[in-house]
Amino acid sequence: MRLVIALGGNALLRRGEPLTAANQARNVDLAARSLAPIIKAGHQVVLTHGNGPQVGLLALQGEAYSESAGFPLDVLGAQTEGMIGYLLERALTATCGSEREFATLLTQTEVSSTDPAFLHPTKPIGPTYTEIEARAMATARGWTITRDGRDWRRVVPSPEPVRILEIAIIRRLVDLGVTVICAGGGGIPVMTREDGSLVGVEAVIDKDLASALLAHALGSDGLLLLTDVEGVFDEWGTPDAALIPSSTPAAMAERQLAAGSMGPKVAAACRFVDRQGRFAVIGALGQAQAMLDGTAGTRITLDDDHAFGAIA
Amino acid sequence: MRLVIALGGNALLRRGEPLTAANQARNVDLAARSLAPIIKAGHQVVLTHGNGPQVGLLALQGEAYSESAGFPLDVLGAQTEGMIGYLLERALTATCGSEREFATLLTQTEVSSTDPAFLHPTKPIGPTYTEIEARAMATARGWTITRDGRDWRRVVPSPEPVRILEIAIIRRLVDLGVTVICAGGGGIPVMTREDGSLVGVEAVIDKDLASALLAHALGSDGLLLLTDVEGVFDEWGTPDAALIPSSTPAAMAERQLAAGSMGPKVAAACRFVDRQGRFAVIGALGQAQAMLDGTAGTRITLDDDHAFGAIA
């Protein structure tokens, strides 16, 4: 099968952990071990990843160094594609041995200059703060801040991904049997100027929506969105919380799901299933193989009766 | 022709210029315009680039942010591959239009753990300092510093590149007609542990030596090393300074060339010519096309009498 697999931020950093090279490397090693059986089984895997904590940290580092101006978010996003791609490729090569070839491809994602997201920042980046810290940072730096679970974080615009510029190269590499790491952080956000040239954008694209776009453009059989919870829950946060084992885009649209980080994942999964007619699964990184087998996670297909037909 | 073209640090930053996103983007646009005629002519171009100023700046930014530890040089090198690769790919796409496909590939370069360079740091990174500033930084941070022209800079180990890990992917992309940007900063330095796995190394590889290795591994017809001077000069820095239009590895070995940044370039050019039997040219970024035509730069071939035979 051709599969696009999106690694959530927890693949590189658990909540509350300091963002050090050692912590990232250890978590990436765990992620590589979860993915190795799928890659070794010969599936055509395209791997994407988030970059929220990383891009925020690099922005803070740039601001802390007083001798020069910091870089804009497109340039910082490119830096995180290099850093995270390197750690992933190194760990996957170590885990999968010489059985598979890996390539990490720099990826630009086009967005629309008229996207309403530029007026309403929603994407959390960087570390978490207390409310008092967050309000102080917002005043000092002109940030937009928002509550993220029990904590507060900086938020930046997250426009819709419209086109992945390197899609033809990614397709060729996949056709050659290469496991491709790409569209990190949703891809570097760029937009087209009136003269047709591209310019970087101060934004961070949602990596699940970019992964859905990528999966559709590649004609993928499935989309796996890996995070740090077991799937989508009804009544999340209550004693009646229950994992939804399978559903359809139509049924998901009618459910009252709690807001939070699961919203974009459900939207991305449903979008892929609606467009492509194949399956998407949302679940925990450590259960990636079981999600593919149909025994873990929340599986979304066009027709709930045939939720597991796509595997056969 | 199949050509490996190495962009010196000046492709992104002129001496003394602050390392801002805007300065980098402007210089990269100029570099793209110099390279466009060669790429548009249909040559199979593989583009590499330095990262000395960038990797040093990212190290300083990381140290300036007190909330977390900075990243080691292999991780910072990966970040610069993302950042510079993005700027180059964006500028080349704008300049060459849709006539060519571009791919920026993350590249790891293996070095030997017993390389003597680890005991003798020689590679300048980061900004320039006065002698007083440099000595203060060396004391405060445990840096090794050295004189670089009229200024002082931090130096780090620069071990020999032994193997480019992604070479098979690079070759495939080149065979498909893709213009590949890779081996940025000489590649991310990694070494093999006793258990066979790879680990990152605190070093910065010389991008000209890595480019020579890459050119040999790809069976290139030529290697162009682009910098901010017109070529290699006899009696450099004296009134008798004279450009050497062509030479051989044997003749270059006998010349008394002034030390400095030209040393590694001459060594890299001679190594490629000795191994591959084809031509290398050292010269100014703005004269890339003329260097290929044989009318600019210092051309090194096995046999000086046939220095221009390789072009036909």
Image (cartoon, coloured by chain):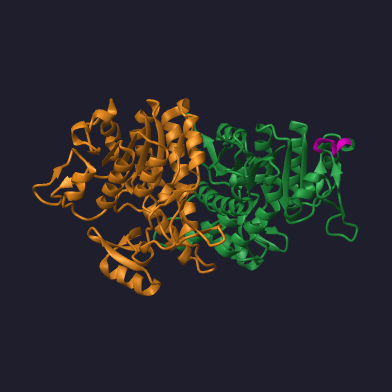
Chain colours: A orange, B green
Side of A221 where B125 appears, left or right: right
Q: Residue A88's spot in the image, x, y percent?
A: 43, 40
Q: How many marks?
A: 0
Q: Residue at x 79, y 54 (%)?
A: B230
> Which residue extends farthest left?
A239
Side of B131 where A26 appears, left or right: left
Q: Residue A113's spot in the image, x, y percent?
A: 44, 62
Q: Quadrant of the N terminus of chain A?
A: top left
Q: Residue at x 89, y 61 (%)?
A: B239
Side of A185 where A153 appears, left or right: left
Q: Quadrant of the C terminus of chain A?
A: top left
Q: Residue at x 28, y 64 (%)?
A: A146
Instruction: Name the quadrant containing residue B168.
Output: top right
Side of B250 where A50 appears, left or right: left
Q: Residue A109's spot in the image, x, y percent?
A: 45, 51
Q: Residue at x 81, y 49 (%)?
A: B297
Q: Residue B10's spot in the image, x, y percent?
A: 67, 57
* Magenta stretch, residue numbers: B306-311
Instruction: Name the quadrant containing residue A96.
Output: top left
Is any atom of residue B226 visible in this view? yes
Q: Nearer the viewer, residue A226 or B211?
A: A226
Is any atom of residue A13 visible in this view? no
- Asked if the stretch drawn in magenta spans residue B250, the answer is no
Rendered position, A59 above or below A290: below
Magenta span: predominant SS is helix
